[in-house]
Image (tube, helix red, strand yellow):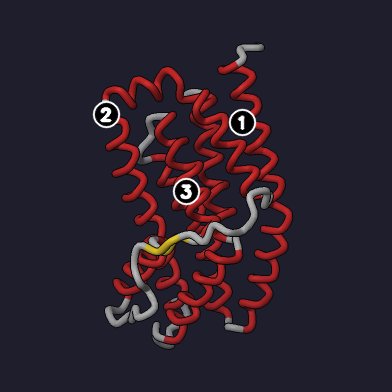
């Protein structure tokens, strides 16, 4: 595998982590895991099990959407040819715009969208319900998750002809902080404030750093593949 693919793989997983600790997705995960903790029985490891299944459900949603979108795009001969020839050039402005969005340069008017109304979702199916809850909650895209997933991961997957692996790594990235929250809940609800506080501090510092890395990567691709300076 090329260096470009490994860089894309690292970017996909790191973007998933940044997505999961952003305020809107983090709040959704806390609500879901708190609900799970109250309905998963008294066994000590039950919350961790259900939290892991919830995280797996989220990852599966991103994998399915990414695979279907990227596969359908790459199956079109003209698009496939375009991405093979101009993928890096096309990805350059996408990364720059994504970094600018993460820095708040476009304001906060973008409100995201929901594919499903999750307000009345009830978990009644035991462990399977946690898996389903994670899958459905992942479809309720917040502004940051929509921007990063459709603006970075999908183009990145298309340009690298990786309809499965990069969405998978993004999904795993979003799952890691969720499992961390489940562990905190497993030790007691009082621990959750400490974990969310750490997640907030991490997001505060990691988000702008990631944004500037995206911008730098976009500029690098532009200099190399558009202006051919090296």
Q: Which residue is mark 3?
A: 149
- The Cα–Cα distance between marks 3 and 2, rounded to whole angstroms, is 21 Å
Q: Quadrant of residue 100?
A: top right
Image location of residue 36, percent across then percent down? 43, 79
Q: Is residue 28 left or right of residue 158?
A: right
Q: From the viewer's perspective, is residue 104 above or below residue 195?
A: above
Q: From the viewer's perspective, is residue 30 above or below residue 124?
A: above
Q: Nearer the viewer, residue 124 or 67?
A: 67
Q: Nearer the viewer, residue 225 or 130?
A: 225
Which label was assigned to residue 76? 2
Q: Is residue 30 left or right of residue 61?
A: right
Image location of residue 66, percent across then percent down? 36, 45
Q: Quadrant of residue 120?
A: bottom left
Which label was assigned to residue 159? none
Q: Is residue 150 left or right of residue 219?
A: left
Q: From the viewer's perspective, is residue 118 above or below residue 62?
A: below
Image location of residue 106, percent across then percent down? 63, 50
Q: Residues within 10 Å of mark 2 (few under 14, many from 20)?
A: few
Image location of residue 46, percent across then percent down? 42, 78
Q: Earlier in the sequence, mark 2 or mark 1?
A: 2
Quadrant location, the C terminus: top right
Badge 1 element: helix
- The Cα–Cα distance between marks 1 and 3, rounded to whole angstroms, is 17 Å
| Residue drawn at x 45%, y 46% as measured from the top left | 150
- The Cα–Cα distance between marks 2 and 1, rounded to whole angstroms, is 26 Å
Quadrant location, the N terminus: top left
| Residue drawn at x 55%, y 39% as measured from the top left | 10
Q: Residues within 10 Å of mark 1 (few under 14, many from 20)?
A: many
Contact (Cβ within 8 Å) of mark 2 with mark 1? no
Q: Which residue is mark 1?
A: 218
Q: Residues within 10 Å of mark 3 (few under 14, many from 20)?
A: many
């Amino acid at each position: 595998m090329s260096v470009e693919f490994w860089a894309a793989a690292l970017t996909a997983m790191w973007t998933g982590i940044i997505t999961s600790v952003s305020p809107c997705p983090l709040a959704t995960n806390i609500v879901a895991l708190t609900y799970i903790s109250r309905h998963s029985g008294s066994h000590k490891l039950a919350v961790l099990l259900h939290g892991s299944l919830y995280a797996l459900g989220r990852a599966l949603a991103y994998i399915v959407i990414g695979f279907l979108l990227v596969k359908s795009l790459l199956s079109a001969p003209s698009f496939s040819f375009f991405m093979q020839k101009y993928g890096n050039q096309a990805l350059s402005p996408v990364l720059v715009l994504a970094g600018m969005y993460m820095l708040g340069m476009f304001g906060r008017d973008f409100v995201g969208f929901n594919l499903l109304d999750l307000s009345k979702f009830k978990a009644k199916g035991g462990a399977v319900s946690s898996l389903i809850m994670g899958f459905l909650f992942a479809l309720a895209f917040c502004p940051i998750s929509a921007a990063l997933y459709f603006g970075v991961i999908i183009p990145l997957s298309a340009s690298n002809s990786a309809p499965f692996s990069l969405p998978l790594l993004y999904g795993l990235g979003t799952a890691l902080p969720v499992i961390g929250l489940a562990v905190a809940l497993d030790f007691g609800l009082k621990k959750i404030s400490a974990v969310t506080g750490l997640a907030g501090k991490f997001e505060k510092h990691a988000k702008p750093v990631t944004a500037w890395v995206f911008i730098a990567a976009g500029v690098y691709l532009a200099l190399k593949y558009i202006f051919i300076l090296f």
